[in-house]
Image: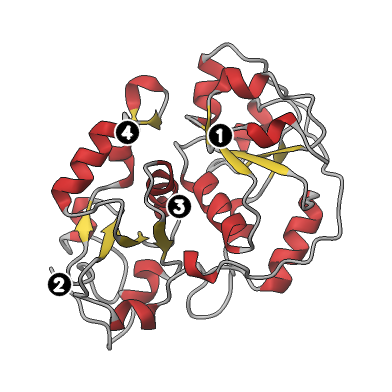
């Protein structure tokens, strides 16, 4: 089933998405930080996703990627099929939407877009909003981890510290990075990691859209992050770094990976090296 929607770019503007709202192959998913954002008004036809479903929710590292059983159940409920083009957005500039798109990439579903600026940009552009909820049409989706390379685990990360061509993008606040705040057993950052807080990649003057690409690339290069490198990105729970992963993809970082355990895992162990 080919469709116009499959031509949608990775980063889609409100006006472009508005032209495709009637496309049957489109699955628009609102994954807000604040649940009431959806009931106050969402993109017509968008279905609501509870952000907690994007994490395992159990074990020592509950922010890890869900199990394949959890992912199969989730994407069947949402009505995902092989032909679906997913458009994700949120109410906070792309954290949870990015985490959703990273999860889709993990299971090899590469037909997806991010609504640039999310619901704020959509409303500011004068596009129609709906307040009645849309029920998904369930499917029978069997998820598999087809692209494990978009994930990096603690063990691999630890083994590769200091490796040439490999870098770590810490998307937390400068205070967390420096070890001045946090609710972990250990505070600080992964040795060699560079810090650009996730919100610095958003443009507050343009409803939290991704900032000018050339400016962002210049700033990242100044930190030592270039598109040819393999980059692991993380925060406290791979929520903020869901957005930095997405930004990396938009900027042409082909080998950007998400560390789902993030500081919740790294900062609560005794065998992980830490810098302040």
Which dot marks residue 29?
A: none
- Where is residue 71? Give x, y as percent: 69, 65
- Front residue of 96/164: it is 164
- Where residue 211 sits: x, y (%)? 33, 31
Question: Quick one: SS at disc 2?
Answer: loop
Which disc is residue 213 wearing? 4
The numbered dot on residue 275 is 2
Q: Residues within 10 Å of mark 4 (few under 14, many from 20)?
A: some
Q: From the image, state whether disc 4 or disc 3 is nearer to you.
A: 4
The residue that appears at 47% across and 29% down in the rendered structure is 117
The mark lying in front, picked from 2 and 1, is 1
Q: Which residue is mark 1?
A: 9
Give the foreground label among 3 and 2: 3
Q: CA distance from mark 2 to mark 1?
A: 39 Å
How many C-alpha atoms fall within 10 Å of the one at disc 2: few (<14), some, or many (≥20)?
Answer: some
Give the Cα separation between the discs numbered 3 and 1: 18 Å
Q: Position of residue 163 (x, y in %)?
A: 22, 75
Query: Residue 164's x, y, as percent?
Result: 20, 71
Find out whether the residues at labels 3 and 2 contact each other: C-beta distance under 8 Å. Answer: no
Residue at label 3? 242
Q: Is 69 above or below relative to 198?
A: below
Q: Earlier in the sequence, mark 3 or mark 1?
A: 1
Q: Disc 3 to disc 2, how far (Cα)?
A: 23 Å
What separation in Å lies between label 1 and label 4 (alpha carbons)? 15 Å
Quadrant assignment, res 119: top right
User: Which badge, 2 or 1, is on the more N-terminal residue?
Assistant: 1
Say above or below: 142 vs 159. above
Q: Residues within 10 Å of mark 3 (few under 14, many from 20)?
A: many
């Amino acid at each position: 089933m080919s469709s116009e929607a499959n031509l949608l770019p990775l980063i889609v503007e409100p006006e472009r998405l508005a032209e495709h709202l009637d496309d049957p192959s489109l699955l628009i998913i609102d994954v807000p930080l604040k649940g009431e954002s959806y009931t106050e008004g969402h993109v017509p036809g968008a279905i609501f996703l509870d952000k907690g479903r994007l994490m395992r929710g159990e074990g020592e590292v509950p922010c890890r990627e869900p199990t394949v059983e959890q992912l199969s159940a989730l994407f069947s409920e949402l009505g995902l099929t092989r032909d679906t083009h997913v458009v994700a957005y949120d109410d906070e500039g792309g954290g949870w939407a990015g985490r959703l798109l990273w999860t889709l990439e993990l299971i090899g579903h590469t037909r997806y877009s991010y609504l640039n600026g999310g619901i704020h940009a959509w409303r500011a552009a004068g596009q129609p909003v709906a307040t009645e909820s849309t029920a998904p049409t369930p499917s029978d989706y069997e998820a598999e981890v087809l692209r494990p390379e978009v994930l990096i685990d603690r063990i691999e990360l630890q083994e590769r510290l200091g490796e040439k061509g490999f870098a770590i993008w810490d998307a937390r606040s400068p205070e967390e990075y420096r070890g001045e705040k946090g609710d972990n057993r250990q505070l600080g950052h992964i040795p060699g990691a560079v810090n650009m807080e996730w919100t610095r990649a958003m443009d507050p003057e343009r409803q939290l859209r991704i900032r000018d690409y050339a400016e962002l690339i210049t700033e990242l290069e100044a930190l030592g992050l270039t598109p040819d490198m393999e980059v692991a990105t993380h925060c406290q729970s791979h929520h903020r770094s869901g957005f930095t992963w997405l930004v990396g993809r938009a900027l042409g970082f082909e080998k950007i990976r998400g560390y789902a355990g993030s500081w919740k895992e790294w900062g609560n162990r005794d065998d992980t090296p830490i810098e302040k």
